[in-house]
Image: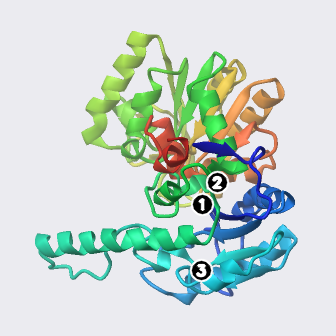
Amino acid sequence: MQQYLDNYDFAGKKAIVRVDFNVPLNDKFEITDDTRIRRAMPTLKKILEKGGSVIIMSHLGRPKGVDDKFSLRHIVDRVSELLGVSVAFAPDCQKADDAAAALVPGQALLLENLRFYAEEEGKPRGLKEDASDEEKKAAKAAVKASQKEFVKKLASYADCYVNDAFGTAHRAHASTALIAEYFPNDKMFGYLMEGEIKAIDNVLKNAQRPLTAIIGGSKVSSKLAVLKNLVGKVDNLIIGGGMGYTFIKAQGGQIGKSLHEDELIPDALAILAEAKEKGVNVSLSVKTIGGQAFENDTPQRIFDTHAIDPEWEGMDAAPESIENWKKIILASKTILWNGPVGVFELPNFAKGTLAIAEALAEATEKGAYTLVGGGDSVAAVTQMGYADKVSYVSTGGGAMLEAIEGKVLPGIAAIQD
């Protein structure tokens, strides 16, 4: 039975909280962006304020075993500073019995990186490249068997479970899905998870019309399921970035050396046909800023997107395309944005993406609901200082994509079941 953070009685209880503290560290192990830590603070502070103690668990990076460069000890001081209490550290997430038992109300404990154990992800490690199918099957079965004990140990530390890690909600890992089974009447979402779920529902289930989705990025293949799910739900579908050129070529356009996927042309045509059948307005780039090479300082030229010279490649949406999209955005009541509309990592070809961020901020100010998700999209609104000028900025790129695809996320289902 799902509980709720605001209503639950934490007094005298220990809460084990799954957060996403997978933050970037420099070569001196200094945090270069603590956004994910800060986003978890309201949940952790609420538990402490209500008389509970917190056992914080997370992963960091993709270690293949114990590796100090992925140790969460590097972030303890920052977590303590933001939480306002001295956070204790357990150097082994599976040997924290005494540290957890010693917690009193108002105290916090951070467990070492969950992924130091293969059981967290449930995937075998160290298999030889030439391992037989039988050896792979046996290794997987062994990890799954020991995973039960791994989860049982984590659950033994606490009285209740809180999942506040949306960034890993699409993974059926030990700490995001399996552990909830040990707390059938004492499991809940944290504030971050509640916010993410509400934001996605505002777009996919409760949208005010017109509903517009802006989908960008480099490849159709990475967003094909998203496009297929959205084409039946939105009023406007703006397709930008590298993936747009596959659609342009599918319509007979000359795209030069622009990124495209010939094998997905049938899928692109099917999406366009379905959109036409359902009355969905699909808007592609009409003018493209081309470059002669995939470099920041390469010469630039503006082309009609359907007529790019053979030796040039599309690198960014030109002003005319942006103006078309801006009109659609400002006429919309609900807007979803995932993915850049140009080569955002190259500053000279980031203008289109930054212009989309600006348009979303303006739409929000005029009363539209705007949801932004995906690394470059989030970076764009953040760089321009618009992160607090859109309705919601998602913390989970992969999780958000799978939710938009219409998939059930294991980390969410485990709480709601």
**Which residue is at 56% across, 79% downward?**
93
* Quadrant hosting residue 268: top left
The residue that appears at 44% across and 78% down in the rendered structure is 117
Q: Considering the numbered disc 3 on the image, is that residue within a helix, a strand or a loop?
A: loop
Quarter of the rendering occupied by the N terminus: top right
Q: Secondary structure at mark 1?
A: loop
**Residue under pointer 1:** 297
**Residue 285 seen from this side:** no
Front position in the image: 53 or 87: 53
Of callouts 3 and 2, the N-terminal one:
3
Q: Which amino acid, by three-letter code, is at mark 2? A: Asn
Circle 2 SS class: helix
Please determine whether, in this image, residue 76 is positioned above or below residue 335: below
- Amino acid type of disc 1? Asp
State the mark number for residue 11.
Answer: none
Callouts 3 and 2 close, C-beta under 8 Å:
no
Amino acid type at mark 3: Glu
Marks 1 and 2 close (CB-CB < 8 Å): yes
> Where residue 275 appears, x then y in whole percent?
42, 18
Residue at 64 percent of width and 71 percent of height:
24
Q: Position of residue 219 (x, y in %)?
A: 41, 46
Q: Which residue shows up at 42% across the image and 80% down it? A: 64
Nearer the camera: disc 3 or disc 1: 3
Residue situated in front as seen by the camera: 223 or 246: 223
Say few, some or many: other residues with alpha carbon within 10 Å of mark 2 (under 14 / 14 to 19 / 20 or more): some
Depth order, front residue of 58/350: 58
Provide the residue designation for mark 3.
112
The residue tagged 2 is 348
Q: Is residue 300 visible?
A: yes
